[in-house]
Image: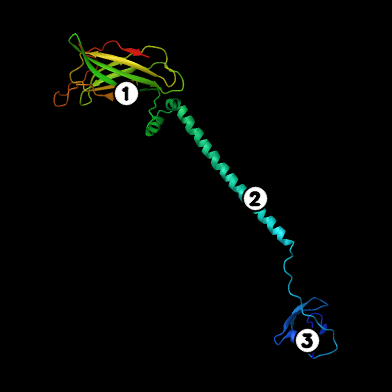
Amino acid sequence: MSIVLSCPSCSTRYRADPHAIGLNGRRVRCASCAHVWTAEAEDPSDLPTLQPAPPEAEPAAESKPHTAFRERQAKKRRTMSAAVAGSAWGGLAIACALLLTASWMFRVDIVTLWPRASSAYAAIGAEVNAYGFTVGELTVTRDNAHGVPLLVIEGTISNLDRRSRALPALRAILRDENSESLLEWSVGLQGAAVPAGQVREFRTVVSDPPPASAEVEVVLVADAMPVHRATPEGAHTPEQVAASDTHAAPAAGHAPEPDTGHH
């Protein structure tokens, strides 16, 4: 037994097997106009047999290479983006390294132009000043010559600059245990300019130093901050000696001996 199906679009009629259509109908396609609808049974007649609509075709196989190509292009873009980001960070690291190197090589010039920068260098443990020198460890000893007490001060100065510099002028200061100045004098250094990074020794001797001397300070001339301090051997303690008046200049009998500079 056959059933009749009629296309709702072009009214073309077909004969179909009821088992193929089923009780609930089935989606079919018209052979004349390609219209697709849900078919239901009609009265039989002499009509051509209608074939069920074929299932929807899957995407063509040739589309897969296009998908693979797009994936490769996306991967290339991600790789290029990562390379550009890496290059940017690498360039930034190189620039920072060059900046740090230059700030160290030209530290004296930087502090000369901008004195406040010395505090930044001090924060990392580097002593830098506009004079290009630093005073090293001091050695302070007491001696005696023909019954006259002597105070011998020895030390070094180092050239921090990247070029040779003329010897600076130094000032030595004797202080009591309260850090009050007792005696001040210039330490004259003689000799050729100090090459970059080199060290020069100096020595100065004071005859009959003030008894209350407890501290020695050596500073670069015009530098308000002390460069180094040391306590002489045998210095009086606060219990033994009271603070004495400050002397603006060496008192009689306390004049320092002529100063010398050594390579």
For label 2, the SS is: helix
Report the residue marked by disc 1: 137
Q: Is residue 243 above or below residue 150?
A: below
Using the image, determine if residue 49 lies above or below residue 223: below
Instruction: Check disc 1: other Cα within 10 Å, few if <14, some if 14-19, many if 20+.
Output: some
Q: Nearer the viewer, residue 142 or 168?
A: 142
Q: How is the image coloured?
A: rainbow
Q: Is residue 100 left or right of residue 236?
A: right
Marks 3 and 1, the one that precedes in the sequence = 3
Q: Give the quadrant of residue 109.
A: top left
Q: Nearer the viewer, residue 205 or 6?
A: 205
Helix, strand or loop at label 3? It is loop
In the displayed structure image, the side of residue 154 where residue 46 appears, left or right: right
- Seen as rendered, the residue at the extreme top is 146
Q: Residue tagged by mark 3? A: 17
Report the Cα–Cα distance between label 2 and label 3.
56 Å
Give the alpha-carbon distance from disc 2 to disc 1, as whole Å: 62 Å
Up-down relation of residue 11 to residue 189 (above or below) = below
**Mark nearer the N terminus (2 vs 3):** 3
Label 3, label 1: how many angstroms apart (C-alpha)? 114 Å
- Residue 53 percent location from the top left of the image: 76, 77
